[in-house]
Amino acid sequence: MPVHDFIKDYPDNNLPLKHHIIQQNRFLQTNIDAYYCLDYTKFRNPGNPDFLVTFKNTYATATRKQLSDAIRELFPFYHQILKLLKEESLNTICVVPRSKARSSYQDNQLFFLETIRRIITAIQSKYNEMFCEVSCFDGSDYIIRHTDTRTTHLNKSGHGGDGDLPYPGITMDTCYLSDEIRGKRILLIDDIYTKTVNVDEDCIQALLDKGAEKVILLTIARTKSHLEDNVNTENLGLLDISDLI
């Protein structure tokens, strides 16, 4: 299947984009506009977007079907991504890196990144064929983790692994950042935003420090227990993502 044709098999999920402001703090020097679509409450709660946990595949035990189902849940967010590119006048998509060095992950633990890459390719392909008025640069390799950090959502259970917990500048210290960031207007994508963790905040600041003209954050979900009032509605071997769609 041509890469852009998969979109017609994933109609708009009709989920509204919810806007919130990420406030300036010691990790972030300016307020940033951010968006999300789903509330994350607790794994296995009714209606919780558990597919985002499947993507993490922390112990590389997710089945082929579980990963395939997760990919199919994520593809329809193409429509929200396209909308933000257009409405916020953005021209590049980047992805917040996972907590460990990218080289330490198996391919089947990087399917969130790979699915976003496929969406980027679809946007570019549709633009080149004049089926879409918006395109973007593929910035999925603009931020690559080279040094392990602590996995924050596993830290309390003692399974956070090696590395530091978030501190101001940790992204710059533990990631390669491309010089291509300079001058770009970036849509930065992550799976779940949780206030007080500050991973996204530090990543945004790193992009700005590298010369990004603008950064907007999109997360598929936001941890519900930290929602604020300023939210507005608007174990298998290595796999190729193409084998799962």
Image (cartoon, grey):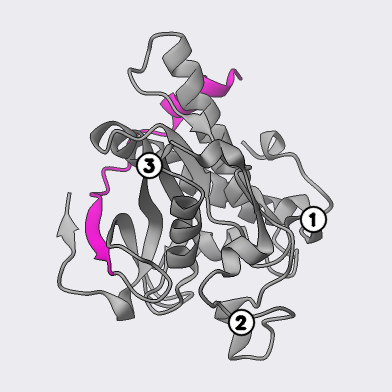
In the depicted structure, whether residue 169 falls above or below residue 88: below
Left or right: residue 17 compared with residue 77: left
Above or below 53: residue 3? above
Residue 212 point in image, percent of width and height? 44, 44
- Which one is earlier in the sequence, the residue at label 3 or at label 1? 1
Q: Position of residue 51 (x, y in %)?
A: 52, 59
Segment colored magenta: 1-23
Marks 1/2: CA–CA distance: 20 Å
Residue 80, labelled with which disc? none
Which image quarter holds the N terminus? top right
Q: Where 16 falls versus 168 (above or below)?
A: above
Of badges 3 and 1, the one in the foreground is: 3
Mark before the other along the chain sequence, 2 or 3: 2
Badge 1 vs badge 2, beta-carbon distance below 8 Å: no
Q: Are marks 3 and 1 in contact (CB under 8 Å)?
A: no
From the viewer's perspective, is the residue at label 1 or at label 2 nearer?
1
Q: Which residue is mark 3?
A: 213
Q: Are marks 2 and 3 in contact (CB under 8 Å)?
A: no
Element at badge 3? loop
Q: Which residue is mark 1?
A: 103
Q: Is residue 47 visible?
A: no
- Identify residue for label 2: 154
